[in-house]
Amino acid sequence: MAAHAEIKAEEFFRAGEKALTKFSLFSSSSKYEDASDYFEKAANQYKIAKKWQESGEAFAKCADCQMRMKENSRAAQYYQQAAEAISKANPIDAVTYYRTAISMQCDAGRFSNAAKLQKQIAEIYEQAGQMQEALENYSQAADYFIGENQPSSAQPMLLKVAQFSAELERYPAAIEIYEKVAKTSMESNLLKYNAKSHLLNAGICAMSSKDIVLVKQKIDEFNDIDYTFPDSREGKFLTAMANAYESFDPDGFADAVYEFDTITKLDPWKVSLLLKVKQSIEVDTHDDLT
């Protein structure tokens, strides 16, 4: 079936190319409409054959035809389809088509759609391990969602920005985002229980900056943001780590992490940051002994 679909796809694609060469004395729009139809059929047959690169290129041809006819809205949809197909074969190659679609969505004032496509680009870069590019695109997606008054859609994007900011050791930026999200969560009865985890993340970022004065300052601020934080597991965990850090006690730090982890499994992001903090305590302890 796949082989048959590929043959049909190639036939449709050639028909589309031939349609573009037609001469019309009165209007050229009909040839672009015919060509677009053929290219779309080709793209769908390539899909069946799982020829994702070829499918994407055929959808891009559809978009080009629509642009010739000044049908920008349809062109944007085809560029998106081109990106989605190509992303299955060569994700980074799909970014160009996503960006073209985003630009056209923005021109049309459809920023919510643009945000969703920007998120797709961010996910491509995240999967490729390109943190800086992922951060920038998640940030742009958040801006589009915020501009459309969709804070609930913006929040996951902002949390991604905070995550990558911390991994890139831009701790102040990460702390600011986690605190902002925590404050927003406290305003909602549905989300306020998530505030403690965001404050804990902010505290871990503060600790990663190796500034115990900042950590203590932040703990006081967190207690003001959420009055239940000091008596919560997250609050006690952060305080225990801070005390161990201040006392140059790597074993006490490890014990605090272990006790918390036995009840609430720490995610790899936290583990990675906390491991660096523990190693810095061990280095400081060794320096004191020598």
Image (cartoon, helix red, strand yellow):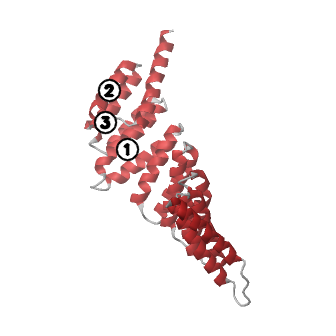
Q: Amino acid at mark 1?
A: His
Q: How many numbered marks are there?
A: 3
Q: Residue at x 49, y 48 (%)?
A: 161
* Residue ID for mark 3: 235
- Give the residue at the far bottom of this rendering: 26
N-term mark: 3 or 2: 3
Q: Are marks 3 and 1 in contact (CB under 8 Å)?
A: no
- SS at badge 1: helix
Q: Nearer the viewer, residue 146 or 268?
A: 268
Query: Whole-Å distance between the Cαs marked 3 and 2?
Result: 15 Å
Q: Which mark is residue 287?
A: none
Residue 41 percent coordinates (x, y): 55, 71
* Residue ID for mark 1: 198
- Say if 280 sits above or below 49 in the image: above
Of the two numbered discs 1 and 2 in the rendering, the one whose residue sits closer to the viewer: 2
- Judge whether residue 246 can be spotted in this image: yes
Q: Amino acid at mark 3?
A: Gly
* Residue ID for mark 2: 258
Q: Residue at x 44, y 57 (%)?
A: 154
N-term mark: 1 or 2: 1
Q: Nearer the viewer, residue 18 or 81?
A: 18
Of the two numbered discs 3 and 1 in the rendering, the one whose residue sits closer to the viewer: 1
Of the two numbered discs 3 and 2 in the rendering, the one whose residue sits closer to the viewer: 2
- SS at badge 2: helix
Residue 159 percent coordinates (x, y): 44, 48
N-term mark: 3 or 1: 1
- Say if 288 sits above or below 187 in the image: above
Q: Tell me the crowding category of disc 3: few under 14, some 14 to 19, or many 20 or more residues within 10 angstroms, Cα based.
A: many
- Say if 37 sits above or below 133 in the image: below
Q: Amino acid at mark 2?
A: Tyr
- Judge whether residue 76 can be spotted in this image: no
Query: Whole-Å distance between the Cαs marked 3 and 1?
Result: 11 Å
